[in-house]
Amino acid sequence: MSGPGECQSTNDNVARSNNTFLIGMAPEISSDGSQIHQRRAFDEVIPYPPTVDDLLRVLSGCEARLVAGTPGSSAPPDDESEHGRLKEFYERIVDTISDGIRVIDGRNRTIVLANRAHLSWIGKQAHEVIGARARDVPWGFDADDCPVQMTDIVDVAIETAEPARRLIATRPRVGRELCWIDVVAYPMSGASGSVDHVVLVGRDVSERVRMETSLAAERDRRDHVLRSAPVGILTTDSTGTIEFANPPIAQIMGLEGTDTVAGKNILVVPQLQAMEIAAGLWEVLTEGKPLHLDRVSCRGTGRRETIFNVRAEPIISHAGEISGIVAVFEDVTETVLLQRRLSATTADLAMLSEIGESFQDSRDTEVILQTILVGVTAGEGLGFNRAFLLVADHETGTLRGSYAIGPSDLSEASRIWQELGKKPHSFRDILEGYREAISRDEVTVNKVAKSLVISLEDAQNIASKAAKERRAFLVTDGMNHPLVPRQLAEQLGTDSFVVAPLIFEDRVEGVIIADNAITRKSITELDLRSLELFAHQARLAVERSRLHAELERQLEELREAHELLRTNHEEMLRTEKLAAMGQVAAQVAHEIRNPLVAIGGFARSIRNSLREDDQNRKFAEIIVEETARLENILREVLDFARPPKPRHDRVDVCSVLRRATEMLERELQKRSIRINMQIPRGPIMVLGDAGQLRQVFHNLLQNAMDAMERVDKSSRLLSISLSCETDRQVTVTVEDTGGGFEADALEHVFEPFFTTKSHGTGLGLAICQQIVRDHGGTIYVTNRPERGATFAVRLPLLEKEVLNGENPGS
Amino acid sequence: MAKILVVDDENALRVLYKHELTQDGHDVDLAGTADEAVAKVRETAYDVVVLDIRMPGKDGLEALTEMFAERRNIKVIINSAYSSYKENFISWAAEHYVVKSADTTELKEKIAQVLGG
């Protein structure tokens, strides 16, 4: 037997052209053998290789024609020869068929016909087979070398008059591997209508079976892959009915198995609807649009949330139509939760850092304690529901409940937490928010806090134990805990809490009791360790901040000391400079003085000798005035260079100031300067030299008057005041409206030889400063740009005791 | 009318004082140094001596001491460019201290005072 792909020799009456098979009479082959011409006996065109059905159909057609007369021949048939010729023709046709054919007589089960392919398969000659009983000639041998018979299907074909089929695994008599033969038994009915022959057609389907087997294996492997894939995979047909769903799908959807979804339409699977992706999947099917969804949440009742990414693509058939969809569900729950945890941890760290900063900022233990309490309860912090602060009073030996943070009940809790959840709160916001609540006594938690009073020495109490042993405790069964008095558990209203000591600078400041009384969330060892860590952090932060503050303070002291040194040094330099200048000035002044006196003296003499109407008298007068001015300057220089020591008399500053003002009264009137004078009646006594003080006030008033020369008469106002802000000193101020100093001039006004006037020595204010200092006072100037300058002199008051002691009568 | 000795190392000032005081009707003698002044005091009994302090060589204070040695009751008016010496002059036993000035009014008043007293 040969396979369908192998070509047998070409029979005269059967011509092959491409994949069609023409059956006809007397084909003509061209001389070169390539071109086939044929006279067409029948119009039938059948595909190659022909099936048995086709052949039987064709053959029966032939027979009918043959009975009616040989096609293409008009001669009447010769029965004997015609029959033999026909039989031989049949046999030759049957031999051309590549399937093995065996025809069995239905009555005695003998073989009446076997074609060449069949004989070749069973390794027999025709004469050995024809007429033999079918069961004696097996179709080959199976894997166990047993002969393979077809009795069963032959029986069925005879009994039912329907074709029967059987697939056998067999190998030919000699060599060759096991092949798969598909055998069909076709019943043939005789004239009586009953089956008189059975045609067995055996076709080698090894190739197909092998392909099917490998296809099945392939399918198995594919299914296995899909089933064991770490992602959920789901496919539908073109109507959206789920054909395949692997186990992870069931896991993602929270189903017992995939059976509940297989065969259902995606639109009616409740889980897909709940996830709000059913419509999206449907669109993939109807629109052909791929679906990409990230982080879809699925939260079945009573099970944890799963989060997954969905990718769905249409399955496009060869015809280009959407034949279904394939959807992939990737479970990213772990990743997302990890990310959430990570960002929560980041937030925690940020919060801790903020808390640290708060500690740095505050020097106040109270604020620090509040900060700790907020840190313990803030969601971004340790996240306890409530925290109670018990402050240690070492004098009375008690731990006394001070205040607490936390909601009173679940409704308040949800309100607060919702409020907090609305916008990201910085730690400072939360702290501010709580400050107010802490101070309110009517708040439930504060009432509870206030009710807590525990002896520090109470060895039977977990709180005092925590303070004493300086470590934190986790209590999970407070009602039956040996160190938790029933009262404490009742006051707190929970029997699960943590107690942690607060230690700053090696001193127990108190303890914190934290619980989850509202949400009833269990407290773990991890929470305890977090609290301990937090308390430790707080302690470090507090100590660090206090150390920092101490360093700052010391630094400030150093800075001040340095500043003082610098000022003293500058003062010293100034003094030296002044002394040197003074010596030079004295020398020069003295040398000038005598000639000046001579010039002035003779000028007077000349003036006096001249008559009133003599023009030279006027000139002499000018010389007299100018020399008088020069003399005045020299006096100032000499006074500055060798200042006289002040006398130490009791002086009434009020009268000295009034006297200095009175002396300039005429000049003030002349220059249209208004005066605003606020001098108390006095007496206000200082110790000093009246003459020198008068000179100071005189200089200041003179300067103020000169400054106002450059402004309009209407705006000239001289303000003089005297006041005692404290009982230790008196302040005299002289204020003008002369426009003030230039900014860069201001710092030089007390320097000798510095002047803004067109004439003058620049010594007036330097002398003033020296005199005021000799009196133990200070002089300074403030400038109001565009308006004027204000000079102030502060002098120490004569002490009252001295005043009283020296004036017992007054 | 009094007999007055003016002691000053500046010639211009000696001329000035002589002119001024002579005009007032006084009999004025002059001395340019301390020694000259002491010598003149030894010879003549002046009613008043007007004495400068800062002079080259022997200064006015030495001259003052020597003058008192010559004449115990001699009346001296210090006429100095330095106002700062004023505070010490009382211990010098001089009658008055005048700050030297082109305006001789104060000096003349002091002389009148001394003569009147």
Image: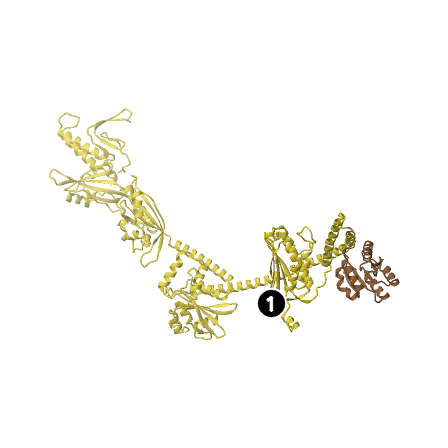
Chain colours: A yellow, B brown
Res. A122 visible in picture: no
Q: What x and y, as percent, mark residue B18? A: 82, 56
Q: What x and y, as percent, mark residue B113? A: 78, 63
Res. A635 visible in picture: yes
Image: A563 above or below A82:
below
Image: A305 above or below A397:
above
> A716 or A462: nearer the eye?
A716
Q: Specify the amino acid type for callout 1.
A: Asp
Q: Is residue A440 left or right of residue A719?
A: left
Q: Is residue A588 left or right of residue A734?
A: right
Q: Which residue is mark 1?
A: A727
> A485 or B73: nearer the eye?
B73
Q: What x and y, as percent, mark residue A709? A: 64, 51
Image: A129 above or below A543:
above
The quadrant where residue A57 appears: top left
Image: A132 above or below A250:
above
> SS at mark 1?
loop
Q: Chain of mark 1?
A: A
Q: Is residue A152 left or right of residue A499?
A: left
Figure quadrant of the C terminus of chain A:
bottom right
